[in-house]
């Protein structure tokens, strides 16, 4: 269509005109157009020079400062709230409730000889001090029931948790011991107590001696090495 | 080198009408360094107004002719001309010297023209052929013209008429080749087609123009 390829190649390389075309095309932009374009170009660089190179400096610094202050204030506020947070009132009632909790656990009901009365003692709340009788309630848990004569070891077993063991009615010997235990002065000393038991056996009061021995063992459980007489 | 010197000399002239007189000669000689263009654009981005004036003087004519021939309407061409240079101004900081300034400039021009066609909802290939409109683009000189000038004007009129008969894609490729003096690869990049497609369009355009101009000469 365009003739030989050589002609088109000449056209591409601008070596030879393929057809006659106007030598000097008189089309030129009018002077008004030149003025408009040049004015825009000048205004653009003038606006560049009037404005700072980094636009963020005008507002970046105050924003950064405000953000920093906000973070610092938030951190201090958070720490202040944590330090002022109530850690629970340390009052007598609170302590009593906390201490009462383990006491509420089921314990075997045995013949109580210690200072653990069933009635609750009054607490002097005005001063916050615990009375002597209340303090005695915080003694260690009671020892296991005594080994009563005439009962097999299988019958006297350690109760499991939550099991209420109802002790059998005290025997005659126990009642005798209980009746005199509070008045016997030799019970205050272990050596004299053992000597008294030996004395009972020597006198033939075997039942009383066994009861005393049982009571002795119950109150001196820590003495594991104490001979079983 | 003389052409560049003439262009620079023209920039220093205060009057706009005479300021770009040297640019015309620069186009005729065809000596414009692409490296110089890139450096001028970078200099303008740094705030040197005279660099922009030099750059503008080098490319204003080619760009204007491309837009007038493409749009075939001087008012539209004026709007597009301002829009293209405005984009050059706005994008001065983002310009990188990796591509030729001419490629950058005519890519903007091509895109501006495509945007214009989309705005007026008229596809370029559907734009009608109106030889009278094409002839009106040139200011008519009512004075008595010498014979040589009459003939030159006749050639120019036939050329514009033949150009108007081309499909828009072929006219686009041909005008880019003629006015911007870009290579085929660069034209393909500007128009967003492959090199072979651009070459084929150019071949068809040249063939049609040759046929139209030869026929008109035979008639006269």
Image: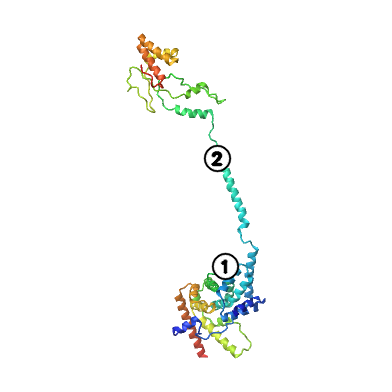
Who is closer to the viewer here, B114 or B98? Answer: B98
Apparent side of residue B153 relative to residue A117 in the rendered image (left or right)? right
Picture layout, residue B10 above or below residue A70: below
Alpha-carbon distance for marks 1 and 2? 55 Å
Who is closer to the viewer here, B53 or B32? Answer: B32
Q: Is residue B83 visible from the viewing direction of this image?
A: no
Disc 1 with disc 2 on a shared chain: no
Picture residue at 51% right of the left edge, 21% below the top? A132
Name the subunit of mark 2: A
Apparent side of residue A215 relative to residue B118 in the rendered image (left or right)? left
Picture residue at 45% right of the left edge, 19% below the top? A114
Task: Identify the image quadrant of residue B55.
Answer: bottom right
Q: Secondary structure at mark 1?
A: helix
Q: Residue lying furthest top in this view?
A: A203
| Label 2 sits on residue | A82
In the rendered image, which quarter contains the C terminus of chain A? top left
Q: At which x and y percent is residue B37?
A: 57, 73
Q: How many marks?
A: 2
Task: Identify the image quadrant of residue B15.
Answer: bottom right
Colouring convention used in this rendered image of the protein: rainbow
Task: Identify the image quadrant of residue A197.
Answer: top left
Who is closer to the viewer here, A20 or B119? Answer: A20
Q: Is residue B210 visible from the viewing direction of this image?
A: yes
| Label 1 sits on residue | B91
Badge 1: residue crowd in 10 Å (few <14, some 14–19, many ≥20): few
Picture residue at 60% right of the left edge, 69% below the top? B43
Numbered badge on residue A11: none
Q: Secondary structure at mark 2?
A: helix
Q: At which x and y percent is residue A149?
A: 34, 17
């Amino acid at each position: 269509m365009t003739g030989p390829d050589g002609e088109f190649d000449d056209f591409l390389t601008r070596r030879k005109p393929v057809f006659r075309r106007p030598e000097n095309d008189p089309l030129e932009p009018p002077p008004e157009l030149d003025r408009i374009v040049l004015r825009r170009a000048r205004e653009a660089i003038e606006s560049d020079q009037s404005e700072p190179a980094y636009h963020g400096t005008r507002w970046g610094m105050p924003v950064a400062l405000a953000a920093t202050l906000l973070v610092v204030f938030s951190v201090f506020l958070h720490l202040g709230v944590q330090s002022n947070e109530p850690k629970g009132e340390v009052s007598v009632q609170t302590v009593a409730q906390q201490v009462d909790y383990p006491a509420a656990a089921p314990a075997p009901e045995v013949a109580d000889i210690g200072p653990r009365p069933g009635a609750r003692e009054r607490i002097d709340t005005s001063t916050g001090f615990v009375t002597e009788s209340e303090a005695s309630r915080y003694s260690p848990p009671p020892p296991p029931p005594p080994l009563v004569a005439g009962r097999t070891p299988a019958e006297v077993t350690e109760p499991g948790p939550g099991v209420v063991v109802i002790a059998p009615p005290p025997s005659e010997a126990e009642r005798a011991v209980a009746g005199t235990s509070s008045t016997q002065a030799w019970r205050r000393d272990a050596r004299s107590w053992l000597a008294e038991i030996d004395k009972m056996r020597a006198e033939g009061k075997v039942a009383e001696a066994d009861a005393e021995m049982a009571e002795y063992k119950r109150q001196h459980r820590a003495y594991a090495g104490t001979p079983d007489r | 080198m003389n052409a560049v010197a003439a262009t620079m000399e023209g920039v220093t002239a205060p009057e706009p009408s005479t300021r770009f007189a040297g640019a015309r000669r620069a186009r005729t000689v065809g000596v414009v360094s692409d490296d110089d263009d890139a450096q001028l654009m970078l200099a303008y981005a740094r705030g040197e107004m005279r660099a922009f004036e030099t750059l503008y003087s080098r490319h204003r004519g080619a760009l204007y002719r491309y837009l007038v021939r493409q749009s075939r309407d001087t008012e539209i061409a004026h709007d597009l001309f301002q829009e293209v240079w405005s984009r050059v101004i706005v994008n001065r900081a983002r310009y990188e010297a990796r591509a030729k300034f001419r490629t950058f400039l005519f890519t903007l021009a091509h895109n501006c023209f495509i945007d214009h066609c989309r705005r007026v909802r008229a596809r370029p290939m559907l734009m009608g052929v109106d030889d009278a409109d094409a002839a009106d683009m040139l200011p008519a000189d009512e004075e008595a013209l010498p014979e040589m000038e009459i003939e030159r004007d006749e050639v120019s009129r036939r050329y514009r008429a033949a150009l108007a008969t081309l499909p828009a894609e072929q006219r686009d490729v041909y005008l880019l080749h003629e006015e911007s003096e870009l290579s085929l690869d660069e034209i393909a990049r500007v128009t967003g087609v492959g090199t072979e497609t651009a070459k084929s369009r150019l071949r068809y355009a040249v063939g049609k123009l040759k046929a139209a101009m030869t026929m008109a000469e035979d008639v006269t």
